[in-house]
């Protein structure tokens, strides 16, 4: 069995920490973008697992399809802060300065940490 198959099995594990580690490990698989998008978009999944998948998408994702998804999550009012922070970083990693405009509304997020992270990225034009 290949590493990818094992990681996909771990993404279905009952333990959130195992799913989170599998999502992080998928950053090493350049073909994992579609799988990671499904994890990020799964509102039933733990926010920590979704955040780990977002971080991995920032490495292996396709800019044109993933950045709009990540910016949408970062701007979602009821999304968990850890997920928003991961989405902010991943969108900047993939989209660079092009992601700045999408982060502008997030600078007014009700969570001050999220707003500050978005503002920092806007001011730095997404330079990590």
Image: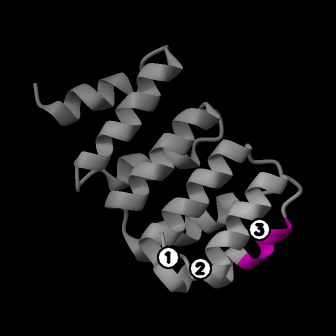
Residue 75: percent from left, percent from top: 74, 64
Q: Residue at x 84, y 52 (%)?
A: 111
- Residue for badge 3: 106
In front: label 3 or label 1: 1
Residue 123: horizontal and vertical position, in percent? Answer: 66, 81
Q: Secondary structure at mark 3?
A: helix
Q: Earlier in the sequence, mark 3 or mark 1?
A: 3
Identify the residue under disc 1. Answer: 127
Span highlighted in magenta in the image: 104-108
For this view, does 93 lie left or right of residue 104? left
Q: Nearer the viewer, residue 14 or 47?
A: 47
Which tag, 3 or 2, sits closer to the chain's start?
3
The residue under the point 35% across, 55% down is 33
- Is 104 in front, or is 117? 117
The residue that appears at 82% across and 48% down in the rendered structure is 78
In reply to whether residue 49 is colored magenta, the answer given is no
Q: Position of residue 62 (x, y in %)?
A: 37, 69
Which x, y percent locates residue 99? 57, 79
**What is the spatial separation of the Cα atoms under label 3 and label 1, in whole angstroms?**
17 Å
Characterize the local packing of mark 2: few (<14), some (14-19) or many (20 or more) Cα atoms within 10 angstroms: few
Q: In the current view of this chain or complex, which residue is farthest to the left?
A: 1
Instruction: Name the image quarter holding the N terminus.
Output: top left
The outermost residue toward the top is 14
The residue carrying mark 2 is 124
Residue 38 visible in the displayed image: no
Prevailing secondary structure class for the magenta stretch in the rendered image: helix
């Amino acid at each position: 069995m290949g590493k990818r198959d094992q990681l996909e099995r771990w993404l279905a594990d009952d333990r959130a920490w195992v799913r989170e580690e599998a999502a992080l490990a998928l950053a090493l698989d350049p073909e994992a973008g579609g799988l990671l998008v499904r994890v990020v978009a799964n509102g039933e999944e733990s926010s920590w697992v979704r955040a780990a998948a977002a971080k991995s998408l920032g490495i292996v994702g396709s800019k044109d399809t993933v950045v709009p998804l990540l910016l949408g999550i970062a701007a979602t009012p009821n999304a968990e802060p850890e997920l928003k922070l991961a989405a902010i970083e991943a969108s900047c990693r993939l989209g660079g300065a092009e992601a700045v405009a999408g982060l502008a509304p997030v600078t007014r997020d009700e969570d001050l940490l999220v707003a500050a992270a978005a503002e920092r990225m806007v001011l730095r034009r997404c330079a990590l």
